[in-house]
Image (cartoon, rainbow, N blue to C red):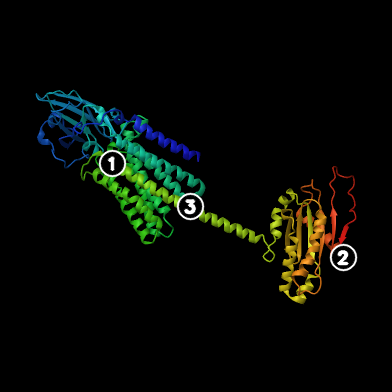
Amino acid sequence: MQASRFLTLFAQMVAVLALWLTPGTLHAQAPKDASIAPECHAATGSDVSFEQMADRTRWICDNSDWRADQPSAWLWFDRSAWESGELPRHFFTRIARHQSISFAALDDDGTMRSVRYLEKDGQPLAAGPVFQLALPEITTSTRAVLMRVDLPHSLPLLTEARLIHQVEYANWSQLEMMLLALVIGMLILPLAFDLSYFVVLRERSVLVHAAMVASMIAYVFFAGGLISVIATLPVAFISVAGALTWALGCGISALFLADFLEKDAQSPFMRRVTLATGIWTIVMPGFFSLQLHPTQAFDDQLYFFTFIPALVVITAAIAEAIWRGSRSARIIALAWMPLILAGTERFLRGVGAYTGPSSLDQLIYIAIGIEVVIMSLAIADRFFALRRERDAARTEARMLEQLSERDPLTGLMNRRAVETRFATLRAEGFDTFALVDLDRFKSVNDRYGHQIGDRALIACAEALRGGDGRDTIAIRLGGEEFVVLMRGKRTIERLEALRQMVAMRISTEIVAIDFPVTASMGVIELPSASKELMNLDEMYARADALLYQAKESGRDRMCFERLKLFNKAPKSRPKPGPVSELAA
Protein backbone atom coordinates (compact mmCIF):
# COMPACT_ATOMS: atom_id res chain seq x y z
CA MET A 1 0.00 0.00 0.00
CA GLN A 2 2.83 2.40 0.79
CA ALA A 3 4.41 1.76 -2.63
CA SER A 4 1.05 2.36 -4.32
CA ARG A 5 0.58 5.68 -2.54
CA PHE A 6 4.11 6.74 -3.40
CA LEU A 7 3.65 5.97 -7.09
CA THR A 8 0.32 7.77 -7.14
CA LEU A 9 1.90 10.85 -5.59
CA PHE A 10 4.76 10.63 -8.08
CA ALA A 11 2.29 10.55 -10.99
CA GLN A 12 0.57 13.64 -9.67
CA MET A 13 3.91 15.41 -9.27
CA VAL A 14 4.86 14.60 -12.86
CA ALA A 15 1.59 16.04 -14.12
CA VAL A 16 2.07 19.25 -12.12
CA LEU A 17 5.70 19.59 -13.22
CA ALA A 18 4.78 19.03 -16.85
CA LEU A 19 2.17 21.77 -16.75
CA TRP A 20 4.22 24.20 -14.66
CA LEU A 21 7.58 23.84 -16.37
CA THR A 22 6.40 23.48 -19.96
CA PRO A 23 7.26 26.71 -21.77
CA GLY A 24 4.00 26.41 -23.70
CA THR A 25 2.18 27.17 -20.45
CA LEU A 26 4.31 30.24 -19.72
CA HIS A 27 4.24 31.83 -23.16
CA ALA A 28 1.67 32.61 -25.76
CA GLN A 29 0.96 29.74 -28.10
CA ALA A 30 2.81 29.86 -31.42
CA PRO A 31 1.04 31.46 -34.37
CA LYS A 32 0.11 29.08 -37.14
CA ASP A 33 2.83 30.48 -39.43
CA ALA A 34 5.50 30.76 -36.70
CA SER A 35 7.47 27.74 -37.92
CA ILE A 36 8.96 27.44 -41.39
CA ALA A 37 8.98 24.08 -43.13
CA PRO A 38 11.63 23.09 -45.70
CA GLU A 39 10.70 23.71 -49.33
CA CYS A 40 13.03 21.08 -50.82
CA HIS A 41 15.09 18.10 -49.69
CA ALA A 42 17.89 15.93 -51.05
CA ALA A 43 20.16 13.00 -50.15
CA THR A 44 23.80 12.72 -51.25
CA GLY A 45 27.16 11.22 -50.46
CA SER A 46 29.41 12.76 -47.83
CA ASP A 47 31.63 14.58 -50.38
CA VAL A 48 29.04 17.14 -51.55
CA SER A 49 29.55 20.74 -50.38
CA PHE A 50 27.22 23.67 -49.70
CA GLU A 51 28.49 25.41 -52.81
CA GLN A 52 27.45 22.46 -54.95
CA MET A 53 24.03 22.29 -53.29
CA ALA A 54 23.37 25.96 -54.10
CA ASP A 55 22.21 24.63 -57.45
CA ARG A 56 18.42 24.12 -57.16
CA THR A 57 18.44 21.39 -59.80
CA ARG A 58 19.87 18.93 -57.26
CA TRP A 59 16.83 19.17 -55.01
CA ILE A 60 13.44 17.42 -54.75
CA CYS A 61 10.84 20.09 -54.16
CA ASP A 62 7.78 17.98 -53.38
CA ASN A 63 6.80 15.73 -50.47
CA SER A 64 8.13 12.50 -51.97
CA ASP A 65 11.25 10.31 -51.84
CA TRP A 66 12.43 11.32 -48.39
CA ARG A 67 15.54 9.35 -47.51
CA ALA A 68 17.62 8.88 -44.36
CA ASP A 69 19.83 6.07 -45.66
CA GLN A 70 22.48 8.22 -47.35
CA PRO A 71 25.57 9.67 -45.67
CA SER A 72 24.16 13.18 -45.93
CA ALA A 73 20.63 14.58 -46.04
CA TRP A 74 19.82 18.15 -47.10
CA LEU A 75 17.00 20.63 -46.49
CA TRP A 76 16.33 23.91 -48.30
CA PHE A 77 14.44 26.66 -46.46
CA ASP A 78 13.45 29.43 -48.86
CA ARG A 79 13.13 33.15 -48.13
CA SER A 80 9.58 33.19 -49.50
CA ALA A 81 8.48 31.49 -46.28
CA TRP A 82 9.61 34.36 -44.01
CA GLU A 83 9.52 37.46 -46.22
CA SER A 84 6.28 38.68 -44.72
CA GLY A 85 7.23 37.83 -41.14
CA GLU A 86 10.10 37.83 -38.67
CA LEU A 87 13.48 36.43 -39.63
CA PRO A 88 14.19 32.93 -38.34
CA ARG A 89 16.76 32.62 -35.54
CA HIS A 90 16.50 29.00 -34.42
CA PHE A 91 16.11 25.51 -35.81
CA PHE A 92 14.27 22.64 -34.16
CA THR A 93 13.32 19.09 -35.09
CA ARG A 94 12.46 15.65 -33.72
CA ILE A 95 15.07 14.19 -31.39
CA ALA A 96 17.01 11.53 -33.32
CA ARG A 97 20.57 10.35 -33.68
CA HIS A 98 22.94 11.98 -36.17
CA GLN A 99 26.60 12.80 -36.43
CA SER A 100 26.41 16.51 -37.09
CA ILE A 101 24.14 19.25 -38.44
CA SER A 102 25.46 22.18 -40.49
CA PHE A 103 23.70 25.35 -41.66
CA ALA A 104 24.60 27.82 -44.38
CA ALA A 105 22.83 31.18 -44.84
CA LEU A 106 22.96 31.90 -48.61
CA ASP A 107 22.68 35.60 -49.50
CA ASP A 108 21.62 37.15 -52.81
CA ASP A 109 25.23 37.90 -53.73
CA GLY A 110 26.31 34.29 -53.18
CA THR A 111 27.87 34.88 -49.77
CA MET A 112 27.51 32.03 -47.29
CA ARG A 113 27.70 32.07 -43.50
CA SER A 114 27.88 28.61 -42.05
CA VAL A 115 27.93 26.91 -38.65
CA ARG A 116 28.34 23.26 -37.71
CA TYR A 117 27.04 21.45 -34.64
CA LEU A 118 27.90 17.99 -33.36
CA GLU A 119 25.21 15.71 -31.96
CA LYS A 120 26.18 16.59 -28.40
CA ASP A 121 25.50 20.27 -29.08
CA GLY A 122 21.76 19.77 -29.51
CA GLN A 123 19.66 21.29 -26.74
CA PRO A 124 16.55 19.24 -25.85
CA LEU A 125 13.61 21.46 -25.02
CA ALA A 126 11.74 20.98 -21.78
CA ALA A 127 8.56 19.99 -23.59
CA GLY A 128 8.05 17.66 -26.50
CA PRO A 129 10.52 15.28 -28.18
CA VAL A 130 12.44 18.08 -29.89
CA PHE A 131 15.83 19.80 -29.71
CA GLN A 132 16.96 23.18 -31.02
CA LEU A 133 20.06 24.80 -32.53
CA ALA A 134 20.90 28.42 -33.25
CA LEU A 135 21.09 29.48 -36.92
CA PRO A 136 23.87 31.55 -38.45
CA GLU A 137 22.98 35.22 -38.91
CA ILE A 138 19.94 35.61 -41.17
CA THR A 139 19.51 39.01 -42.87
CA THR A 140 17.00 40.55 -45.23
CA SER A 141 19.32 39.66 -48.11
CA THR A 142 19.41 35.96 -47.15
CA ARG A 143 17.53 34.10 -49.88
CA ALA A 144 17.79 30.58 -48.41
CA VAL A 145 19.02 28.56 -45.49
CA LEU A 146 20.66 25.27 -46.44
CA MET A 147 20.88 22.53 -43.84
CA ARG A 148 23.03 19.40 -43.97
CA VAL A 149 22.62 16.39 -41.68
CA ASP A 150 25.50 13.92 -41.61
CA LEU A 151 24.54 10.30 -40.84
CA PRO A 152 20.84 10.87 -40.13
CA HIS A 153 19.14 7.89 -38.44
CA SER A 154 15.51 8.92 -38.72
CA LEU A 155 13.17 10.34 -41.35
CA PRO A 156 11.21 12.46 -38.80
CA LEU A 157 14.52 14.23 -38.07
CA LEU A 158 14.15 15.60 -41.62
CA THR A 159 10.42 15.74 -42.24
CA GLU A 160 9.66 17.54 -38.96
CA ALA A 161 12.55 20.04 -39.20
CA ARG A 162 11.47 23.69 -38.83
CA LEU A 163 12.92 27.20 -38.53
CA ILE A 164 11.47 29.63 -35.97
CA HIS A 165 11.99 33.13 -34.68
CA GLN A 166 11.35 32.44 -30.97
CA VAL A 167 12.59 29.21 -29.44
CA GLU A 168 9.44 29.00 -27.29
CA TYR A 169 7.42 28.31 -30.44
CA ALA A 170 9.29 25.04 -30.87
CA ASN A 171 7.51 23.41 -27.93
CA TRP A 172 4.44 21.24 -28.03
CA SER A 173 1.18 22.87 -27.04
CA GLN A 174 -0.14 22.94 -23.50
CA LEU A 175 -2.87 20.47 -24.45
CA GLU A 176 -0.32 17.99 -25.82
CA MET A 177 1.77 18.16 -22.66
CA MET A 178 -1.31 17.75 -20.48
CA LEU A 179 -2.13 14.62 -22.45
CA LEU A 180 1.37 13.24 -21.82
CA ALA A 181 1.09 13.94 -18.10
CA LEU A 182 -2.32 12.26 -18.04
CA VAL A 183 -0.95 9.17 -19.79
CA ILE A 184 1.92 8.94 -17.31
CA GLY A 185 -0.55 9.07 -14.44
CA MET A 186 -2.68 6.39 -16.11
CA LEU A 187 0.40 4.18 -16.44
CA ILE A 188 1.86 4.58 -12.96
CA LEU A 189 -1.29 3.57 -11.09
CA PRO A 190 -1.65 0.20 -12.93
CA LEU A 191 2.04 -0.42 -12.27
CA ALA A 192 1.37 -0.03 -8.56
CA PHE A 193 -1.62 -2.37 -8.82
CA ASP A 194 0.44 -4.95 -10.71
CA LEU A 195 3.11 -4.96 -8.02
CA SER A 196 0.45 -5.22 -5.30
CA TYR A 197 -1.25 -8.13 -7.08
CA PHE A 198 2.07 -9.90 -7.53
CA VAL A 199 2.83 -9.68 -3.82
CA VAL A 200 -0.47 -11.46 -3.13
CA LEU A 201 -0.76 -13.86 -6.06
CA ARG A 202 2.85 -14.49 -7.13
CA GLU A 203 1.52 -14.81 -10.67
CA ARG A 204 4.29 -14.46 -13.27
CA SER A 205 1.96 -12.87 -15.84
CA VAL A 206 1.29 -9.97 -13.44
CA LEU A 207 5.02 -9.32 -13.06
CA VAL A 208 5.49 -9.49 -16.84
CA HIS A 209 2.68 -6.97 -17.32
CA ALA A 210 4.33 -4.72 -14.73
CA ALA A 211 7.55 -4.87 -16.79
CA MET A 212 5.56 -3.99 -19.92
CA VAL A 213 3.90 -1.03 -18.18
CA ALA A 214 7.29 0.16 -16.89
CA SER A 215 8.63 0.04 -20.46
CA MET A 216 5.67 2.08 -21.70
CA ILE A 217 6.19 4.64 -18.94
CA ALA A 218 9.82 5.00 -19.99
CA TYR A 219 8.76 5.24 -23.63
CA VAL A 220 6.32 8.09 -22.94
CA PHE A 221 8.96 9.87 -20.88
CA PHE A 222 11.65 9.65 -23.57
CA ALA A 223 9.73 9.54 -26.87
CA GLY A 224 7.29 12.18 -25.63
CA GLY A 225 10.11 14.40 -24.42
CA LEU A 226 8.69 14.65 -20.91
CA ILE A 227 12.03 13.51 -19.51
CA SER A 228 13.47 16.94 -20.37
CA VAL A 229 11.13 18.48 -17.81
CA ILE A 230 12.98 16.52 -15.13
CA ALA A 231 16.56 16.25 -16.39
CA THR A 232 18.83 17.57 -19.13
CA LEU A 233 20.08 14.57 -21.10
CA PRO A 234 22.04 14.25 -24.36
CA VAL A 235 20.07 14.03 -27.59
CA ALA A 236 21.67 10.65 -28.38
CA PHE A 237 20.61 9.15 -25.05
CA ILE A 238 17.01 10.35 -25.35
CA SER A 239 16.77 9.11 -28.92
CA VAL A 240 18.09 5.63 -28.11
CA ALA A 241 16.05 5.34 -24.90
CA GLY A 242 12.78 6.14 -26.66
CA ALA A 243 13.31 3.59 -29.44
CA LEU A 244 14.71 0.94 -27.09
CA THR A 245 11.89 1.13 -24.53
CA TRP A 246 9.33 0.73 -27.33
CA ALA A 247 11.11 -2.41 -28.54
CA LEU A 248 11.25 -3.76 -24.98
CA GLY A 249 7.58 -3.01 -24.40
CA CYS A 250 6.49 -4.74 -27.63
CA GLY A 251 8.69 -7.77 -26.92
CA ILE A 252 7.47 -8.10 -23.36
CA SER A 253 3.87 -7.80 -24.57
CA ALA A 254 4.33 -10.97 -26.63
CA LEU A 255 5.74 -12.76 -23.57
CA PHE A 256 2.82 -11.47 -21.53
CA LEU A 257 0.34 -12.72 -24.12
CA ALA A 258 1.75 -16.25 -23.99
CA ASP A 259 1.66 -16.24 -20.18
CA PHE A 260 -1.69 -14.50 -19.61
CA LEU A 261 -3.87 -16.56 -21.92
CA GLU A 262 -5.58 -19.62 -20.47
CA LYS A 263 -3.65 -22.87 -20.79
CA ASP A 264 -5.93 -24.27 -23.49
CA ALA A 265 -6.22 -20.98 -25.41
CA GLN A 266 -3.06 -21.56 -27.45
CA SER A 267 -1.71 -24.56 -29.26
CA PRO A 268 1.77 -25.59 -28.10
CA PHE A 269 3.18 -24.49 -31.47
CA MET A 270 1.59 -21.02 -31.32
CA ARG A 271 2.76 -20.52 -27.77
CA ARG A 272 6.36 -21.37 -28.74
CA VAL A 273 6.14 -19.01 -31.72
CA THR A 274 4.72 -16.23 -29.52
CA LEU A 275 7.51 -16.60 -26.98
CA ALA A 276 10.15 -16.68 -29.74
CA THR A 277 8.62 -13.56 -31.30
CA GLY A 278 8.83 -11.75 -27.97
CA ILE A 279 12.53 -12.55 -27.69
CA TRP A 280 13.07 -11.58 -31.35
CA THR A 281 11.39 -8.21 -30.80
CA ILE A 282 13.51 -7.44 -27.77
CA VAL A 283 16.75 -8.41 -29.53
CA MET A 284 16.40 -7.24 -33.16
CA PRO A 285 14.55 -3.91 -32.95
CA GLY A 286 16.41 -3.43 -29.67
CA PHE A 287 19.71 -3.63 -31.51
CA PHE A 288 18.66 -1.26 -34.29
CA SER A 289 17.29 1.17 -31.71
CA LEU A 290 20.89 1.81 -30.65
CA GLN A 291 21.32 3.67 -33.99
CA LEU A 292 25.01 2.98 -34.27
CA HIS A 293 26.73 5.07 -36.92
CA PRO A 294 28.14 1.99 -38.77
CA THR A 295 24.54 0.80 -39.30
CA GLN A 296 23.20 4.23 -40.32
CA ALA A 297 22.42 3.21 -43.90
CA PHE A 298 19.81 0.64 -42.86
CA ASP A 299 19.00 0.76 -39.14
CA ASP A 300 16.12 3.23 -39.50
CA GLN A 301 14.26 1.00 -41.97
CA LEU A 302 15.14 -2.28 -40.25
CA TYR A 303 14.09 -0.97 -36.86
CA PHE A 304 10.53 -0.65 -38.15
CA PHE A 305 10.50 -3.71 -40.42
CA THR A 306 11.68 -6.05 -37.64
CA PHE A 307 8.44 -5.28 -35.80
CA ILE A 308 6.42 -6.97 -38.55
CA PRO A 309 6.83 -10.53 -37.13
CA ALA A 310 5.51 -9.31 -33.77
CA LEU A 311 2.52 -7.66 -35.42
CA VAL A 312 1.69 -10.78 -37.44
CA VAL A 313 2.26 -13.35 -34.69
CA ILE A 314 0.47 -11.41 -31.95
CA THR A 315 -2.54 -10.88 -34.22
CA ALA A 316 -2.56 -14.58 -35.16
CA ALA A 317 -2.16 -15.68 -31.53
CA ILE A 318 -5.07 -13.52 -30.37
CA ALA A 319 -7.23 -14.73 -33.27
CA GLU A 320 -6.48 -18.39 -32.46
CA ALA A 321 -7.24 -17.86 -28.77
CA ILE A 322 -10.56 -16.14 -29.56
CA TRP A 323 -11.45 -19.02 -31.90
CA ARG A 324 -10.73 -21.41 -29.01
CA GLY A 325 -13.16 -19.45 -26.82
CA SER A 326 -10.65 -17.54 -24.67
CA ARG A 327 -12.17 -14.75 -22.58
CA SER A 328 -8.73 -13.29 -21.91
CA ALA A 329 -8.02 -13.08 -25.66
CA ARG A 330 -11.16 -11.01 -26.25
CA ILE A 331 -10.08 -8.57 -23.53
CA ILE A 332 -6.57 -8.36 -24.98
CA ALA A 333 -7.97 -7.77 -28.47
CA LEU A 334 -10.05 -4.88 -27.13
CA ALA A 335 -7.05 -3.43 -25.28
CA TRP A 336 -4.47 -3.85 -28.03
CA MET A 337 -6.48 -2.92 -31.12
CA PRO A 338 -5.96 0.87 -30.67
CA LEU A 339 -2.27 0.23 -29.96
CA ILE A 340 -1.86 -1.95 -33.07
CA LEU A 341 -3.56 0.66 -35.26
CA ALA A 342 -1.51 3.53 -33.81
CA GLY A 343 1.68 1.46 -34.10
CA THR A 344 0.88 0.69 -37.74
CA GLU A 345 0.45 4.40 -38.43
CA ARG A 346 3.79 5.12 -36.76
CA PHE A 347 5.40 2.32 -38.79
CA LEU A 348 4.15 3.73 -42.12
CA ARG A 349 5.30 7.20 -41.17
CA GLY A 350 8.64 5.86 -39.94
CA VAL A 351 9.47 4.03 -43.19
CA GLY A 352 8.54 7.06 -45.29
CA ALA A 353 5.24 5.82 -46.74
CA TYR A 354 3.92 9.30 -46.00
CA THR A 355 4.84 12.30 -43.90
CA GLY A 356 2.83 13.84 -41.13
CA PRO A 357 3.09 16.18 -38.15
CA SER A 358 4.60 15.03 -34.87
CA SER A 359 1.20 15.53 -33.23
CA LEU A 360 0.22 12.17 -34.75
CA ASP A 361 2.38 10.60 -32.04
CA GLN A 362 -0.36 11.54 -29.61
CA LEU A 363 -2.37 8.66 -31.08
CA ILE A 364 0.11 6.12 -29.79
CA TYR A 365 0.24 7.72 -26.34
CA ILE A 366 -3.55 7.64 -26.11
CA ALA A 367 -3.53 4.01 -27.28
CA ILE A 368 -0.98 3.14 -24.58
CA GLY A 369 -3.20 4.68 -21.93
CA ILE A 370 -6.24 2.75 -23.20
CA GLU A 371 -4.28 -0.52 -23.29
CA VAL A 372 -2.96 -0.21 -19.78
CA VAL A 373 -6.33 0.74 -18.27
CA ILE A 374 -8.17 -2.16 -19.95
CA MET A 375 -5.42 -4.68 -19.17
CA SER A 376 -5.23 -3.51 -15.58
CA LEU A 377 -8.96 -4.14 -15.24
CA ALA A 378 -8.44 -7.57 -16.82
CA ILE A 379 -5.64 -8.35 -14.38
CA ALA A 380 -7.82 -7.15 -11.52
CA ASP A 381 -10.56 -9.48 -12.76
CA ARG A 382 -8.03 -12.33 -12.94
CA PHE A 383 -6.80 -11.38 -9.46
CA PHE A 384 -10.27 -11.65 -7.91
CA ALA A 385 -11.01 -14.85 -9.82
CA LEU A 386 -7.78 -16.44 -8.61
CA ARG A 387 -8.44 -15.18 -5.12
CA ARG A 388 -11.89 -16.76 -5.17
CA GLU A 389 -10.35 -20.01 -6.41
CA ARG A 390 -7.66 -19.83 -3.74
CA ASP A 391 -10.21 -19.13 -0.99
CA ALA A 392 -12.37 -22.00 -2.22
CA ALA A 393 -9.32 -24.28 -2.25
CA ARG A 394 -8.40 -23.20 1.27
CA THR A 395 -11.95 -23.77 2.46
CA GLU A 396 -11.96 -27.20 0.90
CA ALA A 397 -8.58 -27.96 2.46
CA ARG A 398 -9.85 -26.88 5.86
CA MET A 399 -12.92 -29.05 5.41
CA LEU A 400 -10.77 -32.02 4.42
CA GLU A 401 -8.51 -31.35 7.38
CA GLN A 402 -11.50 -31.22 9.68
CA LEU A 403 -12.81 -34.43 8.18
CA SER A 404 -9.44 -36.09 8.72
CA GLU A 405 -9.50 -34.96 12.35
CA ARG A 406 -13.13 -35.86 13.06
CA ASP A 407 -14.69 -39.20 13.83
CA PRO A 408 -17.22 -39.75 10.99
CA LEU A 409 -19.73 -41.53 13.24
CA THR A 410 -19.94 -39.24 16.28
CA GLY A 411 -18.47 -35.99 14.93
CA LEU A 412 -16.01 -35.83 17.83
CA MET A 413 -12.33 -35.12 17.33
CA ASN A 414 -10.27 -38.24 16.72
CA ARG A 415 -6.89 -39.37 18.06
CA ARG A 416 -4.99 -37.54 15.26
CA ALA A 417 -6.60 -34.24 16.25
CA VAL A 418 -5.74 -34.51 19.94
CA GLU A 419 -2.17 -35.66 19.20
CA THR A 420 -1.46 -32.54 17.09
CA ARG A 421 -3.08 -30.19 19.60
CA PHE A 422 -2.24 -31.77 22.95
CA ALA A 423 0.59 -29.41 23.92
CA THR A 424 -1.57 -26.39 23.03
CA LEU A 425 -4.52 -27.75 25.00
CA ARG A 426 -2.31 -28.33 28.06
CA ALA A 427 -1.05 -24.77 27.77
CA GLU A 428 -4.66 -23.56 27.65
CA GLY A 429 -5.39 -25.18 31.00
CA PHE A 430 -6.86 -28.60 30.13
CA ASP A 431 -5.22 -30.38 33.07
CA THR A 432 -7.67 -33.26 33.64
CA PHE A 433 -7.53 -36.33 31.39
CA ALA A 434 -10.35 -38.91 31.49
CA LEU A 435 -10.33 -42.20 29.60
CA VAL A 436 -13.91 -43.54 29.11
CA ASP A 437 -15.02 -47.03 28.07
CA LEU A 438 -18.56 -48.40 27.66
CA ASP A 439 -19.17 -51.48 29.82
CA ARG A 440 -20.16 -54.74 28.08
CA PHE A 441 -20.48 -52.95 24.75
CA LYS A 442 -19.65 -56.15 22.87
CA SER A 443 -22.92 -57.61 24.16
CA VAL A 444 -24.84 -54.74 22.54
CA ASN A 445 -23.34 -55.45 19.11
CA ASP A 446 -23.79 -59.18 19.47
CA ARG A 447 -27.45 -59.06 20.58
CA TYR A 448 -28.77 -56.02 18.67
CA GLY A 449 -26.38 -55.57 15.75
CA HIS A 450 -23.91 -52.86 14.82
CA GLN A 451 -26.58 -50.36 13.85
CA ILE A 452 -27.88 -50.24 17.42
CA GLY A 453 -24.29 -50.28 18.65
CA ASP A 454 -23.50 -47.22 16.54
CA ARG A 455 -26.54 -45.44 17.96
CA ALA A 456 -25.25 -46.20 21.44
CA LEU A 457 -21.86 -44.73 20.57
CA ILE A 458 -23.52 -41.58 19.21
CA ALA A 459 -25.57 -41.20 22.38
CA CYS A 460 -22.42 -41.66 24.47
CA ALA A 461 -20.64 -38.97 22.43
CA GLU A 462 -23.54 -36.54 22.92
CA ALA A 463 -23.43 -37.14 26.67
CA LEU A 464 -19.67 -36.60 26.87
CA ARG A 465 -19.78 -33.32 24.97
CA GLY A 466 -20.89 -31.81 28.26
CA GLY A 467 -22.80 -28.67 29.01
CA ASP A 468 -19.96 -26.32 29.95
CA GLY A 469 -18.98 -25.18 26.47
CA ARG A 470 -15.30 -24.60 25.81
CA ASP A 471 -14.08 -26.14 29.08
CA THR A 472 -14.80 -29.73 28.00
CA ILE A 473 -13.46 -31.54 24.93
CA ALA A 474 -14.62 -35.04 24.01
CA ILE A 475 -12.53 -37.29 21.71
CA ARG A 476 -13.28 -40.72 20.29
CA LEU A 477 -10.16 -42.87 20.18
CA GLY A 478 -11.83 -45.82 18.50
CA GLY A 479 -14.36 -48.57 19.20
CA GLU A 480 -16.15 -47.80 22.48
CA GLU A 481 -13.18 -45.88 23.93
CA PHE A 482 -13.37 -42.10 24.48
CA VAL A 483 -11.22 -39.37 26.04
CA VAL A 484 -12.51 -36.26 27.81
CA LEU A 485 -10.20 -33.29 28.46
CA MET A 486 -11.44 -30.80 31.03
CA ARG A 487 -10.31 -27.60 32.68
CA GLY A 488 -11.63 -25.39 35.44
CA LYS A 489 -12.83 -26.15 38.96
CA ARG A 490 -14.42 -29.34 40.32
CA THR A 491 -13.36 -31.37 37.30
CA ILE A 492 -13.75 -34.71 39.13
CA GLU A 493 -17.36 -33.98 40.08
CA ARG A 494 -18.16 -32.72 36.58
CA LEU A 495 -16.62 -35.80 34.97
CA GLU A 496 -18.59 -38.09 37.25
CA ALA A 497 -21.76 -36.29 36.19
CA LEU A 498 -20.86 -36.86 32.53
CA ARG A 499 -20.13 -40.54 33.21
CA GLN A 500 -23.54 -41.06 34.78
CA MET A 501 -25.19 -39.13 31.95
CA VAL A 502 -23.89 -41.71 29.45
CA ALA A 503 -26.06 -44.52 30.84
CA MET A 504 -29.08 -42.25 31.18
CA ARG A 505 -28.81 -41.00 27.60
CA ILE A 506 -28.38 -44.45 26.09
CA SER A 507 -31.34 -45.88 28.00
CA THR A 508 -33.52 -42.89 27.05
CA GLU A 509 -32.69 -42.71 23.36
CA ILE A 510 -32.32 -46.43 22.54
CA VAL A 511 -35.27 -48.23 24.05
CA ALA A 512 -34.43 -51.42 22.14
CA ILE A 513 -31.64 -52.19 24.60
CA ASP A 514 -33.24 -53.96 27.58
CA PHE A 515 -30.24 -53.76 29.94
CA PRO A 516 -28.30 -50.72 31.23
CA VAL A 517 -25.21 -49.70 29.25
CA THR A 518 -22.89 -48.01 31.73
CA ALA A 519 -19.45 -46.41 31.44
CA SER A 520 -16.21 -46.67 33.40
CA MET A 521 -13.60 -43.91 33.74
CA GLY A 522 -9.93 -43.58 34.55
CA VAL A 523 -9.04 -39.97 35.39
CA ILE A 524 -5.72 -38.16 35.86
CA GLU A 525 -5.77 -34.65 37.35
CA LEU A 526 -2.52 -32.70 36.91
CA PRO A 527 -1.40 -29.68 38.92
CA SER A 528 -2.44 -26.44 37.19
CA ALA A 529 1.09 -25.03 37.46
CA SER A 530 2.55 -27.94 35.53
CA LYS A 531 2.70 -27.54 31.74
CA GLU A 532 4.82 -30.49 30.66
CA LEU A 533 4.61 -32.96 33.52
CA MET A 534 3.30 -35.70 31.25
CA ASN A 535 2.93 -36.13 27.53
CA LEU A 536 -0.12 -37.67 25.87
CA ASP A 537 1.19 -41.24 25.82
CA GLU A 538 2.15 -41.08 29.51
CA MET A 539 -1.22 -39.69 30.53
CA TYR A 540 -3.04 -42.28 28.43
CA ALA A 541 -1.05 -45.13 29.99
CA ARG A 542 -1.74 -43.90 33.53
CA ALA A 543 -5.43 -43.26 32.84
CA ASP A 544 -5.71 -46.69 31.19
CA ALA A 545 -4.36 -48.31 34.36
CA LEU A 546 -6.98 -46.48 36.40
CA LEU A 547 -9.69 -47.48 33.92
CA TYR A 548 -8.59 -51.11 34.29
CA GLN A 549 -8.96 -50.80 38.07
CA ALA A 550 -12.46 -49.39 37.62
CA LYS A 551 -13.38 -52.35 35.41
CA GLU A 552 -11.90 -54.81 37.88
CA SER A 553 -13.77 -53.18 40.73
CA GLY A 554 -17.14 -53.93 39.15
CA ARG A 555 -17.49 -51.43 36.28
CA ASP A 556 -19.85 -48.41 36.23
CA ARG A 557 -17.46 -46.29 38.27
CA MET A 558 -14.56 -43.85 38.14
CA CYS A 559 -11.04 -44.27 39.45
CA PHE A 560 -9.03 -41.07 39.64
CA GLU A 561 -5.67 -39.81 40.82
CA ARG A 562 -4.51 -36.26 41.61
CA LEU A 563 -0.83 -35.83 40.92
CA LYS A 564 1.27 -33.54 43.09
CA LEU A 565 3.90 -30.96 42.04
CA PHE A 566 7.06 -30.81 44.18
CA ASN A 567 9.01 -27.54 44.53
CA LYS A 568 12.15 -29.64 44.90
CA ALA A 569 12.83 -33.18 43.84
CA PRO A 570 12.20 -35.53 46.79
CA LYS A 571 15.11 -37.50 48.18
CA SER A 572 13.37 -40.68 47.24
CA ARG A 573 10.53 -41.19 44.78
CA PRO A 574 7.24 -41.41 46.77
CA LYS A 575 5.27 -44.58 46.51
CA PRO A 576 1.99 -44.30 44.62
CA GLY A 577 -0.77 -43.27 46.96
CA PRO A 578 -4.16 -44.92 47.21
CA VAL A 579 -6.42 -44.60 44.21
CA SER A 580 -9.65 -42.82 44.89
CA GLU A 581 -12.77 -44.41 43.53
CA LEU A 582 -16.21 -43.03 42.80
CA ALA A 583 -18.96 -45.55 42.12
CA ALA A 584 -22.51 -45.09 41.10
Q: Between 570 and 427, which is closer to the camera in this rendering?
A: 427
Of residues 66 and 298, which is closer to you in this image? 66
- For residue 321, what is the image quadrant? bottom left
**Pointer 3: what residue?**
384
Q: Position of residue 526 (x, y in %)?
A: 81, 51
* Secondary structure type for disc 1: helix
Q: Position of residue 316 (x, y in %)?
A: 33, 56
Find disc 1 in the rendering and name its residue. 361
The percent position of residue 70, horizontal first and vertical second, equals: 21, 38
Q: Quadrant of residue 359?
A: top left
* Residue under the image location 87 percent in, 60 percent down: 582
Amino acid found under the numbered disc labelled 2: Glu
Q: Determine the CA span between mark 2 and mark 1.
A: 97 Å
Mark-to-mark CA distance, 1 and 3: 35 Å
**SS of the residue at dot 2?**
helix
Q: Which mark is in front, 2 or 3?
A: 3
Q: For mark 2, what is the residue?
A: 552
Which amino acid type is marked by label 3? Answer: Phe
Which numbered tag is attached to residue 330? Answer: none
Label 3: how many Cα within 10 Å (few below 14, some 14–19, many 20+): some
Is 111 located above or below residue 276 in the figure? above
